Image (spheres, coloured by chain):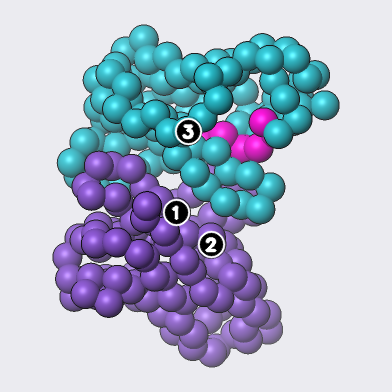
Amino acid sequence: DTAVSQTPKYLVTQMGNDKSIKCEQNLGHDTMYWYKQDSKKFLKIMFSYNNKELIINETVPNRFSPKSPDKAHLNLHINSLELGDSAVYFCASSSQGTDTQYFGPGTRLTVL
Amino acid sequence: ELKVEQNPLFLSMQEGKNYTIYCNYSTTSDRLYWYRQDPGKSLESLFVLLSNGAVKQEGRLMASLDTKARLSTLHITAAVHDLSATYFCAVDQLRTDKLIFGTGTRLQVFP
């Protein structure tokens, strides 16, 4: 009965590769998010989607492209991976206008 | 731009003691959240504070919000080892669902 799930949990790849992270929520929420947590544990929002529409698009390199095929899924595709992309990426979801954002388990991305 | 600061960044405390973590933010907001993160784990929602003067308590943790001072506190009463974790506050910028997180406070409780 997982609420927000992400795959994969770990991702190790070489610089220059392209990779995707998938996120699914079964909470019936209409808004989903991607956050990046760096090595110092600092959390920063990257994107949010509401009912498949992009709402928040922070200053993120355009190598990062979110895609929401439906309101229960939000994927993150990263092109031409760089060393600085190494981080933990968290997906989250909420109902718009209400309170808590629920976070997924995270995907630890390591770029070699 | 909204900035959120927490202090202390690191807190080492003995079991049974009380302490407070502070969360200051730079622009007007009336929606503040506290999360807990265990090492290598996800973020767990602890409290949602939605108005000035809001106070919520769960077990040994109590959170409060003063929107006029732009300050929230997380008070720990009679700490136990199980409370060891990193605690984050987050502020909703202008009710946009865009959470701006504080730097986190790493709490370590020892016997």
Three-letter amino acid code at disc 2? Gly
Residue A86 painted magenta: yes
* Residue drawn at the location 43% of the way across and 75% of the way down: B22
Q: Position of residue A109 (x, y in %)?
A: 68, 30
SS at circle 1: strand
User: How far, Cα to Cα, is label 3 from label 2?
Assistant: 22 Å
Q: Are marks 2 and 1 on the same chain?
A: yes
Tell me which segment is drawn in magenta.
Answer: A85-91
Q: Position of residue B83 (x, y in %)?
A: 54, 70
> Which quadrant of the structure image shows residue A66?
top left
Residue B104 painted magenta: no
- Residue designated by label 3: A59
SS at circle 2: loop
Q: Are marks 3 and 1 on the same chain?
A: no
Q: Colour of chain B?
A: purple
* The C terminus of chain B, quarter of image: bottom right
Three-letter amino acid code at disc 1? Phe
Q: Pointer 1: residues within 10 angstroms few (<14), some, or many (20+)?
A: many
Residue B65 is left or right of residue B26, and the answer is left
Task: Out of B15 and B92, give the one closest to the viewer.
Answer: B92
Give the cyan chain's letter. A
* Residue drawn at the location 63% of the way across and 14% of the way down: A79
User: How far, Cα to Cα, is label 3 from label 1?
Assistant: 16 Å
Q: Position of residue B60 (x, y in %)?
A: 41, 77
Three-letter amino acid code at disc 3? Thr
- Residue designated by label 1: B101
- Residue designated by label 2: B104
